Image (cartoon, helix red, strand yellow):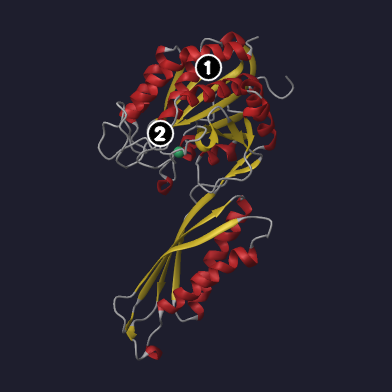
Amino acid sequence: MIDNLEITRRVQEALPWIIEKRRDLHRHPERSGKETRTSALVVRTLEELGVEVRTGFHTTGVAGIIRGSRPGRTVGLRFDMDALEMQELTDHDFRSEVPGMMHACGHDGHTAMGLGVAKVLSGMREELAGTVKLIFQPAEEDAQSGGGAQYMIRDGVLKDPDVDVMIGMHLWPDLDLGAVGTRPGAMMAGSDPFIINIRGKGGHASMPHTAADPVLAGSHIVTALQSIVSRNVDPFAQAVVTVGVFRGGTRYNVIPETATLEGTVRTFDEAVRLQVRDRVIAIAEKTAEALGTVAEVDYRLTYPPLVNDPGIYERAKSCIQDILGPDNFIEVPRPAPGGEDFAFFAKAVPSAFLFLGYRKPGETPVQPHNPHYDFDESALGVGVRVFLRCALDLGKGVSA
Ligand code: NI
């Protein structure tokens, strides 16, 4: 039986290697869906460690399979690999060597943790019940194209061996370094954009009776959309409806032919998500019609709400408390309003998503997607320890 001290010792020993991988990845950031160098590095490293490798999952996705010496469940661990189109402004000697691309969301750290788990766990097969599937995912940041998770699932990443349970993790600025947090139920928002094109009939501003005014129709639609959260959504559920763009017209004395609204909806529950979608479409279409115009709604369901399974949450919580000590487990009070396509895995199999703290006492951490983004690399050791404890415990199944 491998105890926590031994796991921690092996992770500490591997940490310089993990940090070296992270810095290599950081120097060579790649855009969503084009993570070819990253993917090749993952494949090469897993092969060097003697880990069974599968590729061909949605562009650059990779799965590494580590089989234990005893039967048990298959635990999926997910690591995202993509970077962002932005210029890095840190002065690290390992800063991005690619102009206009930067690992500003810590996915370099996530990928390096995946390799760290592979390195340590491949030396622990004797202790492992069941199978661990390391899932290296492209395109988490590319919600507009649907992300990477749902296409890896389509391409069979959860099959053969079938994944029974999954854990994902994201570096998180609002938790202290050394701590890991999560919560039961909703963890991150579903994030769905919409565009409403309103077609009217243009005319002279002084002769509105000969026209059909899309600006007026758009104004009523914006106002009526605010009734969804106040009048349709259960007061004990949460949702956000925001219209961020209202485009229409070219001159003060011309009634234009068309107007366009663009907005986003955030929800934390699938039923509320679909309810809000249906109401946005109905309000836009019917209000436009009532005012003599026509609205066409392009409503995209991109990332669903990320909902943690209550049972896996409990298991993950006890793993975190076990390996890090009770004080380093944080029950996150509220779901985060950002989107995360791990949500697709969480819909497919019982899962828990964890936040990995990197805030240092007395310091204001740099938020993700900032050109100065940075995190303390010792957090990677904390994350790998938690992944390992979860993999070893969840593989044993419920009755173990
Ligand atoms: Ni991210």
Residue 374 is marked as: 2
Place of residue 236 in the rendered image (x, y in percent of width and height, measured from the top left): 69, 56
Q: In this view, does 297 lie above or below 288?
A: above
Q: Hey, what amino acid is under mark 2?
A: Asp
Q: Which residue is drawn at 29% across and 75% down?
A: 250
Q: What kind of element bears circle 2?
A: loop
Please identify the residue farthest to the front as the structure is shown.
362
Could you tell me which quadrant the C terminus lies in? top right
Q: In this view, does 225 lie above or below 87?
A: below
Residue 252 appears left or right of 298: left
Q: How crowded is mark 2: few (under 14 residues within 10 Å), some or many (20 or more)?
A: many
Q: In this view, does 71 lie above or below 83?
A: above
Q: What kind of element bears circle 1?
A: strand
Query: In the depicted view, which residue is nearer to us: 139 or 20?
Result: 20
Place of residue 302 in the rendered image (x, y in percent of width and height, measured from the top left): 48, 49
Q: Residue at x 29, y 79 (%)?
A: 251
Q: How far apart are marks 1 and 2 (CA)?
A: 31 Å
Place of residue 95 in the rendered image (x, y in percent of width and height, measured from the top left): 31, 30
Residue 340 visible in the displayed image: yes
Q: Hey, what amino acid is under mark 1?
A: Ile
Label pair 1/2, CB-CB below 8 angstroms: no
Q: Mark 1 vs mark 2: which is more N-terminal? A: 1
Place of residue 271 in the rendered image (x, y in percent of width and height, measured from the top left): 63, 53
Query: In the depicted view, which residue is nearer to us: 242 or 81?
Result: 242
Q: Residue at x 43, y 40 (%)?
A: 368
Residue 66 is marked as: 1
